[in-house]
Image (cartoon, grey):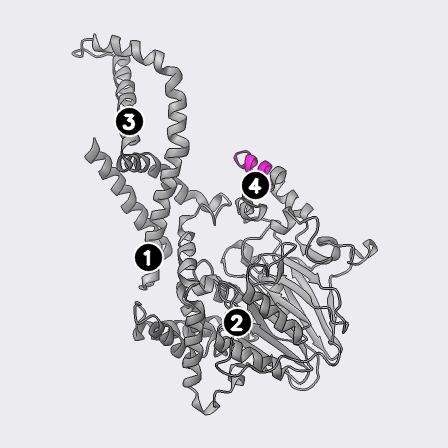
Amino acid sequence: RAGVDRGWVWSFIATLFAIHIGRMAPDGSLLGFLAPAVAVAGDMFVATLITLLVINPLYLAWRWPTRWIERPLWRWYIGQDDSRPGWFLTLAAWWLRHRLRFAVRMRAARYSIRAALGQALQHGLPLAAVIAATVPVWGMSWYFDTENWAAGIYNSWAETRTDDWREAMVRAVRNRNPQAGGDTADFSVSPPGLAGDVPFSFIVIGDTGEGDASQHVLRDQLLTVAARDDVRFVVVSSDVVYPTGAMRDYENKFWLPFKGVTKPVYAIPGNHDWYDALEGFNATFLTPEAARAAISARVDADLNISTTTADRIDQLIGSAARLRMEYGVPTGFQRAPFFDVQTDDFALIAVDTGIVKRVDPEQEHWLGAALARARGKMIVAVLGHPFYAGGYDQRPGFEDFARLYDRLKASGVAMVMAGDTHDLEHYTEPPDASGHALQHLVNGGGGAYLSFGASLAWPPEPALGAWAYYPSSAAVVDKIEAQTPWWKRPAWWWTRSFDAWPFSAEWLSAIFDYNTAPFFQSFVEVRVAREGLVVRPYGVHGRLRWRDLDRSAAGPPAAMADDFVEWTAARPPVGVAAAPRVPRGAAAVR
């Protein structure tokens, strides 16, 4: 049987690889072909777990109490004449052979890792194939869909290279434009309609690109707000496309959901966008010249160990240009994965914090100059990662990230917005000696599966006393209670009773990620006027009201529960200076 068993195992592996190839549609890059292989490895791992943790224990639990039947049945069967088998003899022969074969395999598995793995794959792969085929309808699309497991591999690979890649990209772009003299203003963007002191608005939406109902359900509100005359541009704050930022996913997960947005769209990448070395992002959001220089510089930084050739770079840029024309969404204005918008009295500074919340020396040099240009203005910073999320301070353990916070606060930034955490949260720090109260906004509810950690496990003593979050705990619990089937109830009970220990409610909440109504996705509109900022959050049914949020006592009184949510920020006090410009080559945040 050994050869036959191996044949079946390899047949399942080959079939699963073909399925993943068809669903993931490799684009010819190394990343594209590696992803299905990682998915198959994940299927094999799932098969092993199923066998060792489910099939074998259940079989042994059944085998022990039925041994008293097996032994006398063997004695009876050995004494029978096989020349004229009846139905009972045939059934007994099948059952005994099955039991004996399984016993032999279990004994071999005790003494041989190879035999144990072979047995695990033989018994577990059929069930793993069923899971691979049906997992999208289970509401567990991230933890049990092995096609997304490749993202974890790419995260480990890319996080060690992100700063070096970005630094090489920025240098290459600057060298392509020597007439700018190395001026960091070369990375500014200039949306139309910002001249003078006329009030204007812009949209910030984060963590958008899953391309499913959770993203499309927000589309009508996004288009309605973006179509207003006073809205000048849109900013995507982290994770434009899931799961690996690949160009092949941009049509369904960016261009199609944004079709109808006619204002300029800018973006900073999230960790998922970096998994393909930022190729899809660069081709979509950078000018063609800057995209070509940046992607080529990344390849050079990796010593040309890449399947990205000059022809592939042309294909990436050409695909972005074609899709831009077909869908009519204005992109391709940036020269780096970071940028700033400067008016006479306002500055938007968008910082790429990569995968591990760091800024390379080139971006640090630009940031110092951008903050210097913003001196005395109302400043909003958009980051890839939040300083506060889920009720906790996210800086401990990230010294570079903490230094970035210190610099932004010392520069008089009024509000810091960030994606990465998939919900809407707002915090206000206590005023400092000058009266400046820095506000923080988690703005990652633009389309990805929701982070229920804040709603299900808000800490009894959050890091800041003034806070609010959406969706509310009651709304999340009601949805999970209404839609959780019986076989998920133990996980839900574990989450409610023990906060999913030894994991977390946030980690386990993806099990309850149902892609059905009610949806709690969100984005914000930021209105800029001479007197300050007004931030208005929107949900799938329009502007959010205070009754939709859970909030601290520092929020509005209960009588205002039906009022629309607005967070305001006045201009910082005079005398809060911007940080000095950092000379090239000086110590930088790393």
Whether the magenta-drawn stretch holds residue 11 is answered as: no
| Residue behind mark 1 | 34
Q: Nearer the viewer, mark 1 or mark 2?
A: 2
359 or 474: which is nearer to us?
359
- The CA distance from mark 1 to mark 3 is 36 Å
Residues in magenta, as a range: 485-495
Instruction: Please tell me in which quadrant of the rendered image residue 578 appears.
Output: bottom right
Say what secondary structure mark 2 lies in.
loop
* Amino acid under disc 2: Val
- The CA distance from mark 1 to mark 2 is 33 Å
Say what secondary structure mark 4 lies in.
loop
* Amino acid under disc 1: Leu
- The CA distance from mark 1 to mark 4 is 34 Å
Which class describes the residues within 10 Å of circle 1: few (<14), some (14-19), or many (20+)? few
- The CA distance from mark 2 to mark 3 is 57 Å
| Residue behind mark 3 | 107
Residue at image coords 64%, 68%? 416
**Residue 248 visible in the snapshot:** yes
Res 501 label: 4
Compare marks 4 and 3 and give the one earlier in the sequence.
3
Which class describes the residues within 10 Å of circle 2: few (<14), some (14-19), or many (20+)? some
* Image position, residue 11 (x, y; %): 26, 42
